[in-house]
Image (tube, rainbow, N blue to C red):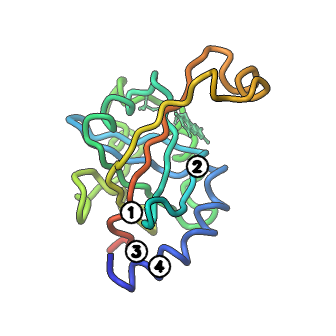
Amino acid sequence: MTQKEIALLTELTPIVQRQLPKGLFLCVDGGAPNTMTIGWGSLGVFWGKPVFTVPVRPQRFTYPLISKARSFIVGVPEDGALVDQRMKAGTWSGRDGDKFQRLGFETVKGRVVDAPAIKACKWQIECVVKSAVDLTESATAPDVVSAMYPARDFHTLFMGEVVACYETER
Ligand SMILES: Cc1cc2nc3c(=O)[nH]c(=O)nc-3n(C[C@H](O)[C@H](O)[C@H](O)COP(=O)(O)O)c2cc1C
């Protein structure tokens, strides 16, 4: 990452924090390019590096793709933009057809990782998975298990080192 990218990532951290509950676009390849909405996650520091951690439940179409690709791009829209698309990408499944096409999204190749980047998103955060951590019932507080995991479909946390961060060329 260049100094410019590190500076932009620092600027984006509160934007990501603010926007996550409304949804960001997690984009992967792994044989079938796909995107899904994430509402949880964290952009922080691990192993002395900037790391974006994204939680993916095992039943998502995205799950085997990100597991295989071990890389992803988080697309961050401008505040208040792509509201409808955030909901649709978080409701529709890539199993039912090309979600980019159905959402009317044009994509470009990632600069560093092999994943699609959504042109309609203002910023791109490209990541290489350095660890994938399965949440477990025994490690999780009972109130969280009953509230969030009644089906015991615990997330895997994909911890991606940020390898590129830039404003999308449009
Ligand atoms: C606002 C919002 C936030 C979401 N956050 C997550 C998340 O953090 N992790 C997750 O596994 N699913 C999350 N989902 C659900 C997935 O986006 C949804 O199941 C999607 O259809 C999966 O697509 P896929 O089957 O193509 O992978 C969220 C959905 C919405 C609407």
Residue under circle 1?
162
Provide residue 65's location: percent of width, then percent of height: 30, 34
At a point 52% along the width and 39% down the height, the residue shown is 55
Q: Amino acid at mark 4?
A: Leu
Q: Earlier in the sequence, mark 4 or mark 2?
A: 4
At a point 57% along the width and 68% down the height, the residue shown is 13
Q: Quadrant of the C terminus?
A: bottom left
From the viewer's perspective, is residue 116 above or below residue 98?
below
Marks 4 and 2, how far apart at CA? 20 Å
Label 4 SS? helix
Of labels 4 and 2, the one closer to you: 4
Q: Quadrant of the N terminus?
A: bottom left
Q: Earlier in the sequence, mark 3 or mark 4?
A: 4
Label 3 SS? strand
Q: Is residue 108 left or right of residue 37?
A: left
At a point 39% along the width and 78% down the height, the residue shown is 5
Q: Are marks 4 and 2 in contact (CB under 8 Å)?
A: no
Q: Earlier in the sequence, mark 1 or mark 2?
A: 2
Residue under circle 2?
23
The number of discs equals 4
Q: Amino acid at mark 3?
A: Glu
Residue under circle 3?
167
At a point 38% along the width and 33% down the height, the residue shown is 62
Provide residue 99's location: percent of width, then percent of height: 37, 38
Residue under circle 4?
8
Marks 3 and 4, how far apart at CA? 9 Å
Provide residue 52's location: percent of width, then percent of height: 47, 56
Q: Are marks 3 and 4 in contact (CB under 8 Å)?
A: yes
Of labels 1 and 2, the one closer to you: 1
